[in-house]
Amino acid sequence: MCANINATNNFVCKNIGDKLCKNCRVIFYCSRECQKMHWKFHKIECKSEIASKDWQPDYVKEKKVPLFVSDDSRSIPFFNPLNKIENLWGKMPEIDIIKIAFNEFEDGKSNFNGPINLLFAASGDLNDIIMSLNGLPLDFDQTVNICVNDYTERIVVRNFMILYLLAKFGKNAIDIVIQIWYSSSLTDIQAIRSLEIFSLILKDSQMMEENLFEFGKLKIHTHFSSKTWMCLAEMLSNRVDLQTGISLRNEIMFNPMRKDYRHRYMQLLTPGERICFDNFRHHGILLPYGALNAHHNVQNRFILDRTNGWVISDNSDPLSRWDIFSVVQIKNGTADEDFYGKLFFYLREQFVMFIDRLQKLSINFDLYDEDALKLDEKLKDKKFDRIYANDLGDESYIGIKSTLIKFRPLLNANNPNATLITLFMNWLPSVPESDRGEIMEGIIQKY
C-alpha cells in the first residue's frame, strides 16, 4: 500500500505503492504527489542521523572504549535490571525436529506406522512446534501427539492462547496472534476480543488442572496448576495504560547503559535496516514500515507484567527467532531492507500452513507447566519419537547429564529414528577446547 497516511485527518491512500523512497529505501508511494503530501511526516526518519550512510556509533565518534569490551559489570550480552526476565520470544531460531523426509519417510514412504509422539520439554514460544508441523505433508495420515512444556507461567499461557485462537478462528486469527505474540500494543478490537474470549475460558475452566478443548480432529489438553491459571487472570486484569507501558518498555530497550551494545549492532546494518530496527525499537509494533499503527492504542496486557513491567531483555528481537535467510526472501511489496515487514508476511505464510495442518491432520496437544526435572514423572508412561530439550543441556540449566538421565528413557525404542535433541548455548566457552570432545564422548557413552 501507499505510505501516505495521516492519522490525524483520518486519511489513508488506498493505492498500491510501487515507488520506493530513494533516500531511505524502506517506504513506498503510489505517486510523486503522495510522497510530497507525506514528506512532513516521513522526513523525520528519512533525514535522521541513523539514515545517513556516514552514521557511526557514539563510542567511535567520541573515541572512547565501549562498555562491551570493558571489565565493567554492565558489559553483559543482555540487560534487564529486574530479577524476573522472561524469554517470551525465545532465544534461538526455529527448527523442525521431525524432518520426516530424512527420517521415517527417507525411502519415500513411512517405515513407521504408529503415531508420531513429540516432546518439547522446555518449549519457550511456539516457533519450533509451528516449523515442525509445517514440515509434515497435508496428506499425513498418522496421529501426531505433541507434549509442550515450559516452567514459566506467562510463556505457557501465551502458548495456550495462540493455539486456541488459531484452532478456534483459523486464518481469521492470524493478525491478532502476530500482535499478541510480538507487539507491545494492540488495537481496540484486538484487546477487547481477546479479553472477552479468555475471560470466558478462565471462568469455564474453574482453574482445574485438567481441561480439554476440542476442535474436530484437533484436541488441546491443558494440565495447568492454579499458578498458571492465576497468571492468565492477572494478565486479563492488567489495566496498565499505553503511555505507562511505553515508559516501562523504554526503560529497558533504551537504557543509556546499553547504548554501546545497540550501536554495535546498528553499525552492521544498512541505513534502511537501521531505520526499521530503530522504528521497531521505538514503537514495538510488528508491521511493515510505514503501515498505519495509530490504532494500536491499547497496551498488550499479555506481554507487560503488571508488577515487574517489561520483563523481556533488551536484546530480545523477533527476528532472532526465525530463519533470517527465509525471512529475507519474502517479497509481498515490502522493501528489501524492511526485515520486520518481511517477518510480518513470513509469519502470515507460516500461520497459513500451520492452520491447514491443524484443520486437516489428527493432532493432540498436551500442555504442561512443569519443572523440567520433574517432567519425567508426569510422562513416565509415554514414549516419544522426538524429544527437544532446547538448551536444558547447558550447565547453567540442568546440564547434559541430567538431560540424558531424565529424557533418554522416554525415547521410543521401537522407532530407530527416535532422537533426543538439546542445545549448548553456553557450554563451549566454559570448557577448555582440548577437553571438549573427550568430556562429551564420556558423557554419551555413560548415559
Image: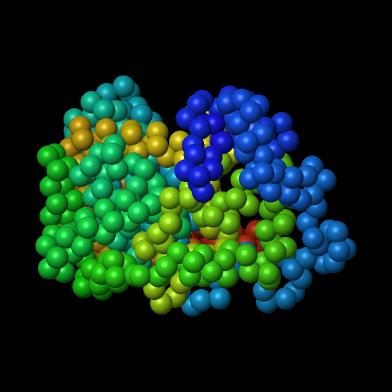
Residue lying at the far right of the rendered structure: 63
Q: Nearer the viewer, residue 181 or 189?
A: 189
Residue lying at the far front of the rendered structure: 9
Image quadrant holding the C terminus, namely: bottom left
Rendered residue at 53%/40% (across/down): 5
Q: Quadrant of residue 215?
A: top left
Q: Quadrant of residue 156?
A: bottom left
Q: Is residue 88 left or right of residue 357?
A: right
Q: Is residue 93 visible?
A: no
**How many numbered discs sit on the rendered protein?**
0
Q: Is residue 262 left or right of residue 153?
A: right
Q: Quadrant of residue 218?
A: top left
In the rendered view, tell whether residue 112 sits above or below residue 432: above
Task: Give the x, y percent position of residue 235.
Answer: 32, 67
In the rendered view, tell whether residue 68 sits above or below residue 112: below
Q: Nearer the viewer, residue 337 or 37?
A: 37
Q: Is residue 264 visible?
A: yes
Task: Give the x, y percent position of residue 2.
Answer: 54, 31
In the rendered view, tell whether residue 101 sits above or below residue 216: above
Q: Nearer the viewer, residue 36 or 27?
A: 36
Figure colour scheme: rainbow
Q: Is residue 35 left or right of residue 52?
A: left
Task: Give the x, y percent position of residue 333.
Answer: 53, 28
Task: Give the x, y percent position of residue 201.
Answer: 17, 59
Rendered residue at 47%/30% (across/down): 14
Rendered residue at 21%/73% (across/down): 226
Rendered residue at 20%/32% (across/down): 360
Residue lying at the far top of the rendered structure: 108
